[in-house]
Image (cartoon, grey):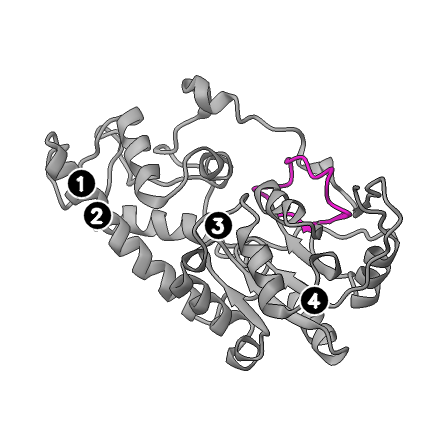
Amino acid sequence: MAVSCSHSSILFPRSTASTSSIGFNRFPCLQTLRFKSRNVYPKSRVSSVSASSASRSLEALIFDCDGVILESENLHRQAYNDAFAHFDVRCPPSSSESLDWSLEFYDKFQNLVGGGKPKMRWYFRENGWPTSTLFDTPPESDDDRAKLIDALQDWKTERYKEIIKSGSVEARPGVVRLMDEARAAGKKLAVCSAATKSSVILCLENLIQIERFQGLDCFLAGDDVKEKKPDPSIYITAAEKLGVSVKDCLVIEDSVIGLQAATKAGMSCVITYTSSTSDQDFKEAIAVYPDLTNVSLKDLETLLQTVVTAA
């Protein structure tokens, strides 16, 4: 099964060149994130995982949210840049324009530092605390720096919600069609995301529509389990709630962290990568796709029936 398709288009494009975007060559810790060519998976790749002879039958299809249903990282980047522009954040303070994180920078940065507040704190610590409409001079005390970070993050979060609700954002190619195929064939459907429940609900209600969201057989978010991916808890819990054996579940993920969670749970996993994850090592996946445009339910059923699982 050979599928050839390109990346889905990035939503809300902004200029990737900015005098306030800092190059990675200044920071050795960021240089370690230089990746292989983005053409590492130019076409779909189907793998076989060796060992026992037990065949599998697709009974449940489980989707991750961020990166699978929604290519969210560029939207987060836009929301950060809009916050920087709104508060006229100049970093370093001598910059002639407000801070603007380029796509190339953010693709690497978001894999280095997790969480919105830690991202900004790290960046400002490395490049100098900024001036802004909140603070005429760079904040020096811990309290003032925390106030700056909190204000930026709060505004960014509301802006992100506005973007999702705007009607301009669509699910990644093939996702809704594949959900409908699975539902029509009587398969169970689930969404398992490490993100907060409120964030996932917002995305699902706006991207796959409320009817599909309410029709899910299982919906789990990061709030529902003690350990987040790559811990397998969320997928093990999903199988229990679905009443389906883990070997008969197929997970669709976009990152190696999600892949590890699925395989540790004993589930097979296919990858639909994004611009941020295309360079990761997906050797444990049974198939790798740029997106789901040309992937049918029958394709996935065939994959799961023929895969030979690790003993």
Q: Do the residues labelled 2 and 1 touch (CB within 8 Å)?
A: yes
Of labels 3 and 2, the one closer to you: 2
- Which tag, 2 or 4, sits closer to the chain's start? 4
The residue singled out by tag 1 in the image is 146
Query: Residue 198's image quarter?
Result: bottom left
- Three-letter amino acid code at the position of disc 4: Ala
- Per the rendering, the mark at residue 150 is 2
User: Would you say residue 135 sits in the magenta stretch?
Assistant: no
**Is any atom of residue 132 visible in this view?**
no
Q: Do the residues labelled 4 and 3 touch (CB within 8 Å)?
A: no
The residue singled out by tag 4 in the image is 60
Disc 3 versus disc 1: distance between alpha carbons? 25 Å
- Three-letter amino acid code at the position of disc 3: Asn
Of labels 1 and 4, the one closer to you: 4
Residue drawn at point x = 56 percent, y = 26 percent: 34
User: Would you say residue 282 sits in the magenta stretch?
Assistant: yes
- Three-letter amino acid code at the position of disc 2: Asp
- Three-letter amino acid code at the position of disc 1: Ala
Which span is picked out in magenta?
Answer: 271-289
The residue singled out by tag 3 in the image is 74
- Per the rendering, the mark at residue 135 is none
